[in-house]
Amino acid sequence: MTDSIHYDDRETMDPERREAGLFARLPAQIALAKAKAPAMARLLAEVDAPAIRDRTALATLPVLRKSELTARQAAEPPFGGLNAEGPGELAHLFMSPGPIYDPQGSGPDPFRFARACWAAGFRPGDVVHNTLAYHFTPGGWMFDTGARAVGCAVIPAGGGNTEQQLAAIAQLKPTAFTGMPSFLKLLLERQEEAGQAATITKALVTGEALTQTLRQELGRRGVTVGQVYGTADLGQIAYEGPTSEGMILDEDLIVEIVRPGTGDPVPEGEIGEVVVTTFSGTYPLIRFATGDLSAFMAGTSPCGRTGMRLRGWLGRADQTTKIRGMFVHPGQVAQALKAVGGISRARLVVTNPEGRDTAVLRCEVPEAGADDLAGRLADAFRTAANLRAEVELVTPGALPGDGKVIEDARIYD
C-alpha cells in the first residue's frame, strides 16, 4: 500500500509491462491446472503450455462454460474435477444456487477483494457493516476477507433483519458499508426517520445496478460509493472507486471479451461475453466463460490506475430462446457459421408476424452478393439447430455491436 489512493504499485504499472508479466506467468498456471485438476487436464490435454504466451495463443484454447458446472459437478463431485486442492485442504466449501459448489482456498484475501475495498476508501481502523449473506454462499466472506485484509473490523450482519441491523449500527457506529446499494439507501432512510446519526461515509456495493440517480442520492447523504464485480468461482474480476470511470480489471486475472457462443475475441469496444483465466492455485480455471456481457473501454482511468477497464455488467450472454418449439442458443449459430466459413459476424432475429415465429439469420460478409453463400448458410443453420431460417447477407458494420447473437423481437399482444 504505497499511498492513500492506490493499494500497491501494480495499479500504476506500465500496461505493456503488466500484460507481459501476466503472460509470462500463464504457461506455469496451465501446467499446474493440467497436473492437479483432472477435468482441466482432460480439457487441455493437447495444449502445449509453454507455447501459450500471448492473447492470440490463449484464444486457441477451449472455453470452459459456467453453465456447464452443475452437470460437471454432478458427474464428478464435488467440484467437477476442476479443483487443484482436495476438499479437506480448503478453508470453506460453498453452495450457491444451481446448485454450484465453490472451493475457497486459504490465505488472508482469497477472493482478492482487498483491492476493491481500498479503492472504495476503506482504511485500517474502519468498521465495516457487511450485509452480504454468510450462509452457504460466499458473498459475505468475499467482502469480509477483503476488508479484514485491509485492516478493518467487520460486523457480519448478513441480509435481512432490518431492525436488528439498525440497532447494531446505532451501537457499533460503522464507518463503511458493503452490500446492495438499495439496502444501504433503506438503512440510511430508516436512520433519518428515527433521528439516528449516520456514521457510514463510504460503501462498496454489488448485486444490482447502481444507477447515477442512486449514486447521487447516496452522495447527498454523505456516502461515497464504489462497485465491485466478482463471482463465487473467480473472486474479484473488476472494481471501481469513487473517482474511477469504468471498472478496472483485477491485477491477477487475464480477461477476454468473446463473441457469445464461441471463444473468439471481439474487436476492442464491442460487447461480448466475459471470459476469465485465473492464477488461483486452488481453482485454476482457464478461459472460464462467465455468461456475463461487457466490453473493454479504451484508455485509462482518471484515478491513475492503468489497468484495462470494463464498462461494467451489461447483461447475460445466454440468449437461448425457443423458436417454433425448438430451443436455439448462440453456440448453434456459431456452429453454422464455422461450417461455412468467411462470416465476420451474424445475428439471428426472431419475430412473429401474424403470430407465427419467423427466424432470419443476418450475416455480415465482405461481398453480400456471393452466389451460393446464403443457401449454404441456410443449410448449415438447419443442420446445427434443426430449424429453418431465412438468410440475409449484409455488409460489414451493418449489425449492432451489442453482443447479441440472438435477438428476440417477437411482440405478444
Image (cartoon, helix red, strand yellow):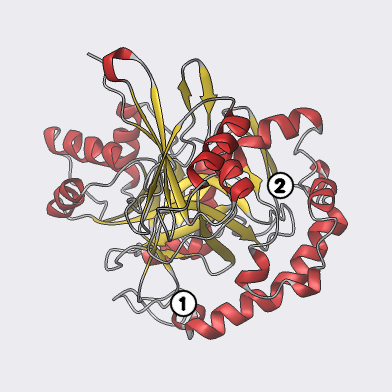
Secondary structure beneath dot 2 equals loop
Residue 165 left/right relative to 288: left
Three-letter amino acid code at the position of disc 1: Glu
Residue toward you, 228 or 376? 376
Residue 261 left/right relative to 348: right
Q: Position of residue 31 (x, y in %)?
A: 82, 65
Vertical position of residue 170 compared to residue 148: above or below: above
Spatial CA distance of label 1 from label 2 is: 28 Å
Report the quarter where the C terminus lies.
top left
Residue in the picture at 63% in, 43% down: 65
Residue in the picture at 61% in, 42% down: 335
Secondary structure beneath dot 1 equals helix
Q: Where is residue 327 in the image (x, y as percent from the top left)?
A: 53, 23
Farthest-out residue, front: 371
Vertical position of residue 364 compared to residue 251: above or below: above
**Total label count?**
2
Mark 2 nearby-residue class (10 Å; few <14, some 14–19, many ≥20): few
Q: What mark, if any, has residue 80 been given in the picture?
A: none
> Which residue was labeled with disc 1?
11
Q: Position of residue 154 (x, y in %)?
A: 46, 49
Q: Where is residue 4 in the image (x, y as percent from the top left)?
A: 36, 77
Vertical position of residue 241 compared to residue 173: above or below: below
Mark 1 nearby-residue class (10 Å; few <14, some 14–19, many ≥20): some
Residue 279 left/right relative to 259: right
Residue 138 left/right relative to 14: right
Three-letter amino acid code at the position of disc 2: Ala
* Residue 94 visible in this rendered orientation of the protein: no
Earlier residue among tags 1 and 2:
1
Q: What mark, if any, has residue 91 been given in the picture?
A: 2
Labels 1 & 2 near each other (Cβ < 8 A)? no
* Residue 344 visible in this rendered orientation of the protein: yes
Residue toward you, 205 or 149? 205
